[in-house]
Image (cartoon, rainbow, N blue to C red):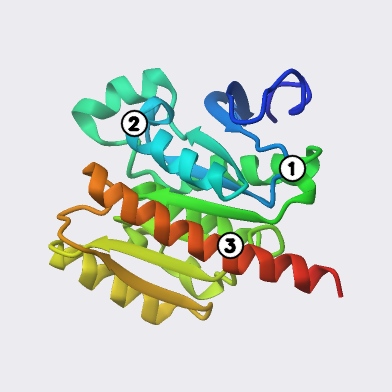
């Protein structure tokens, strides 16, 4: 559960609020940005302890904010885990643990006003993408749209066919191995899906020009499918 202060407490529209998320035995850091009239919420999941501060994530959050989408930049590792992970990579590839933490954040968001009233999207990068796919499979009624970037969708394993949320897979145009992995994973998805390349990029979530393309594509995907979720729930 995220710290007990209300989400709406003293947060100016557009300002990122630092938060602590308690998931099981660990507490994770997150940054929440909430527009004045949000049309949806996107939880951005990274297998890191500091990605919420990175310029690329801030640029993505700013683009989604302009589209009237709230964002929760969630680091799935603790600082201590990241220190170990730099040498061993043992934590970033522990997809079941990452997914369990993301599921806790999804469950919290559905309970917390005003976020629980908003359609929910997930955004995952690399192994965070696999965690997002598993979380979407485990919470089919909670997750309305999914974007994965440079994703190791293959690490989601048997969860792929259970994903119901429309899924956009973004891959750098020059990363042929990642493109093949994502196309193979897309073939296992029963949900609406698309595999899209980011022009001129080795990694989709890398250089500023690539991030701009990712932000534009993600924004369009969320706008379409989160709006559809609202319309479906209104009938």
* Residue carrying label 2: 55
What residue appears at the point 87 percent right and 75 percent down from the top-left corner?
A: 235
> Of helix, strand and loop, which one carries label 3?
helix
Residue 85 placement: quadrant: top left
Query: Can you say which quadrant of the picture contains the N terminus?
Result: top right
Mark 2 or mark 3: whose residue is earlier in sequence: 2
* Residue carrying label 3: 223
Categorize mark 3 by other alpha carbons within 10 Å: few (<14), some (14-19), many (20+): some
Asked whether residue 93 appears in the rendered view, the answer is: yes
What residue appears at the point 49 percent right and 66 percent down from the top-left corner?
A: 159
Residue 59 placement: quadrant: top left
Q: CA distance from mark 2 to mark 3?
A: 23 Å
| Residue 59 higher or lower than 13, as above or below | below
Asked whether residue 137 appears in the rendered view, the answer is: no
- Percent of width and height locating residue 121: 58, 55
- Percent of width and height locating residue 77: 43, 30
Mark 3 or mark 1: whose residue is earlier in sequence: 1
Categorize mark 1 by other alpha carbons within 10 Å: few (<14), some (14-19), many (20+): many
**Frontmost residue, 169 versus 78:** 169
> Of helix, strand and loop, which one carries label 1?
helix
- Percent of width and height locating residue 216: 41, 57
Side of 40 relative to 167 (left or right): right
- Percent of width and height locating residue 149: 35, 55
What residue appears at the point 48 percent right and 40 percent down from the top-left corner?
A: 61
Q: CA distance from mark 2 to mark 1?
A: 25 Å
Residue 115: which numbered mark, if any?
1
> Of helix, strand and loop, which one carries label 2?
helix
What residue appears at the point 74 percent right and 42 percent down from the top-left corner?
A: 115
Nearer the viewer's eye, disc 2 or disc 1?
Answer: 2
**Frontmost residue, 232 versus 47:** 232
């Amino acid at each position: 559960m995220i710290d007990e202060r209300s989400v709406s407490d003293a947060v100016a529209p557009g300002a990122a609020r630092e938060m602590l998320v308690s998931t099981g035995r660990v507490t994770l850091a997150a940054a929440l940005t909430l527009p004045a009239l949000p049309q949806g919420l996107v939880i951005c999941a990274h297998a890191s302890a500091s990605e919420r501060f990175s310029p690329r994530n801030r640029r993505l959050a700013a683009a989604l904010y302009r589209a009237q989408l709230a964002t929760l930049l969630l680091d799935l590792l603790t600082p201590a885990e990241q220190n170990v992970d730099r040498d061993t990579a043992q934590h970033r590839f522990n997809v079941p643990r990452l997914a369990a933490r993301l599921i806790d954040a999804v469950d919290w968001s559905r309970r917390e006003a005003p976020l629980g009233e908003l359609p929910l999207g997930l955004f995952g990068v690399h192994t965070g993408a696999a965690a997002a796919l598993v979380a979407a499979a485990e919470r089919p009624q909670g997750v309305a749209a999914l974007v994965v970037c440079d994703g190791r969708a293959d690490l989601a394993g048997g969860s792929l066919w259970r994903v119901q949320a429309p899924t956009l897979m973004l891959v750098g145009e020059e990363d042929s191995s990642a493109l093949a992995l994502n196309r193979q994973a897309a073939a296992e998805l029963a949900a609406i899906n698309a595999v899209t390349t980011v022009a001129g990029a080795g990694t989709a979530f890398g250089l500023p020009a690539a991030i701009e393309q990712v932000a534009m594509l993600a924004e369009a995907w969320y706008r379409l499918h989160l709006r559809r979720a609202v319309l479906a729930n209104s009938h």
